[in-house]
Amino acid sequence: MPSAKVMSVEQEDSFELPSKIPLIKTTIPGEKSKKILAEQKELETSTVIYPKSFPIAIKRAQDSVIEDEDGNYFIDWVTGISVLNLGHSNLIRNAISTQLSKVWHTLEVPSETRVEFMKELRKSFPANMKNYKTMFGITGADACETAINLAHTVSGIRASTVAFEGAYHGVHGGVITATAGRAYKAPVFSGGMSIIRAPYPYEMWYDYDTSDTLGFLEKVVNDSEAGYEKPDSLIVEPIQGEGGYIVPPDGFLKALREFCDKNDVIMIIDEVQTGLGRTGKMWGFEWDSIKPDIVCISKSIGGGIPLSVVYYREDYDSKLPTPFHLGTYRGNALALAAGTAVLKEIPKYLDRVRSEGSDLQKRFERIGSPLIADVRGRGFMIGIELAENQKPVSKTKMLSMKHTMLSKGLMMHTCGHFGNVFRFMGALNIPSEYLRTGVGIFGESLGS
Ligand SMILES: Cc1ncc(COP(=O)(O)O)c(C=O)c1O
């Protein structure tokens, strides 16, 4: 067999960053970016979203810095929506390039890479979840949809699933039904999945607390005249992501766990955004010390190469038929190699993320702008909700502020029921200096 030369990615692809970051030399977008954006507009669907928020063309990226085609350098507080929890790092580059020199597509036929990944994944869970099984997928939506189907199959009754107001579980053939936003649902036909939408404690605008949610759920289960099918499963994010970085009250997940135990409901935790150290613990559900039945994982688990996992109770395994979940690309070798590197590296940053995360929240609060109505979050998952005249700040104004930040060298994205929440989701290893500088830019851009 001819020998495959392992690319020396570190030498070829990493580049010297300027001493001052951010560094903005042109108006945004610069001329080269403008040309590429125009070509994209000509060629690609007009439905793309992110170029509207970040009108630049990206040349390359290193750690927490993105360089555009015009030689501008931006601080990356977006991380591809929590996909790059370790940033654009050489650790991941090297893991991928080493795997690339061996093999990159194997179906489910095992390689050491595949098995090593699954062992490392088990290690990342609390002691009472180390015998769970792994099922691979490609996207977060794929994982969530599979998890719900898995719960229906295990329960044997293909009943309803409880999902929450403000939830985001993706846009996939069926799981779209579990997603709350009308805009996501409108264009998609979604037969087959039956969702019971439960209230989620979102103090800022709605007067709900944990007892309201539980009261509703008890009604669903116990009042046969209320018009609800009995659910066999419940899916919940430990902190709502796209819904607006909404942190539920302490004990919320524990209360849901008790409800599930009492009523024979399978508890699915969606860790697609909260997982892999984002909240300062490896998994978001660990903040409430619960034991989920099924966990959905994606985004950072592939270090930027599409990968998702449904991690489920071992005793469910014998109840699943073969085939159960199909897909040509599940468990891609490049993604698995990157994922093992991610799983090994992330624990080193958890303490830092908890302490610098709470410090960062205080920095946002200290800006003292009348537009800042709430600062909340855990670890490096921080939402800053903006309001004026007791109403959410408009999406137009949010976009204008986002563009101002970009023109000053900070990439920061938004989310929320009303699109009025700025969200910090920087890499867990981002230099502290970029946190301080970023807060400065954020503060200067408010109201712009
Ligand atoms: C909590 C959560 N679940 C599921 C998804 C869907 O993941 P994907 O976009 O990979 O389908 C997302 C995406 O943002 C998410 O935040």
Image: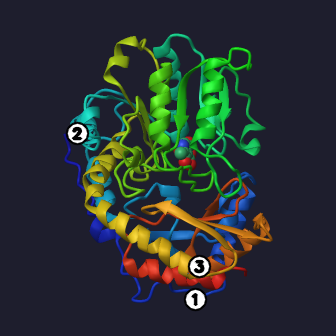
Identify the residue shown where x is 70% and y is 64%: 52
- Ligand 1 shows up in the quarter that is top right
Q: Is mark 2 within 8 Å of ligand 1?
A: no
Marks 2 and 1, how far apart in space? 45 Å
Q: Is 432 on the left or on the right of 217, as rendered?
A: left
Q: Position of residue 218 (x, y in %)?
A: 60, 26
Q: Position of residue 234 (x, y in %)?
A: 54, 30
Q: Is there CB contact under 8 Å for labels 3 and 2?
A: no
Q: Is 277 on the left or on the right of 436, as rendered?
A: left
Identify the residue shown where x is 53% and y is 22%: 149
Q: Nearer the viewer, residue 249 or 4?
A: 249
Name the residue tied to disc 1.
Answer: 25
Colour scheme of this structure image?
Answer: rainbow
Name the residue tied to disc 3.
Answer: 442
Marks 3 and 2, how far apart in space? 41 Å
Q: Residue type at mark 2?
A: Glu
Residue 32 visible in the displayed image: yes
Q: Residues within 10 Å of mark 1 (few under 14, many from 20)?
A: few
Q: Residue type at mark 3?
A: Phe
Q: Position of residue 265 (x, y in %)?
A: 50, 22
Identify the residue shown where x is 61% and y is 77%: 406
The answer to which quarter of the image holds residue 85 is: bottom left
Q: Residues within 10 Å of mark 3 (few under 14, many from 20)?
A: many
Name the residue tied to disc 2.
Answer: 116
Q: Nearer the viewer, residue 413 or 27?
A: 413
Q: Nearer the viewer, residue 73 or 399?
A: 399
Identify the residue shown where x is 70% and y is 51%: 206
Q: Residue type at mark 1?
A: Lys
Q: Nearer the viewer, residue 249 or 274?
A: 249
Q: Which tag, 3 or 2, sits closer to the chain's start?
A: 2
Q: Which tag, 2 or 1, sits closer to the chain's start?
A: 1
Q: Is there CB contact under 8 Å for labels 1 and 3?
A: no
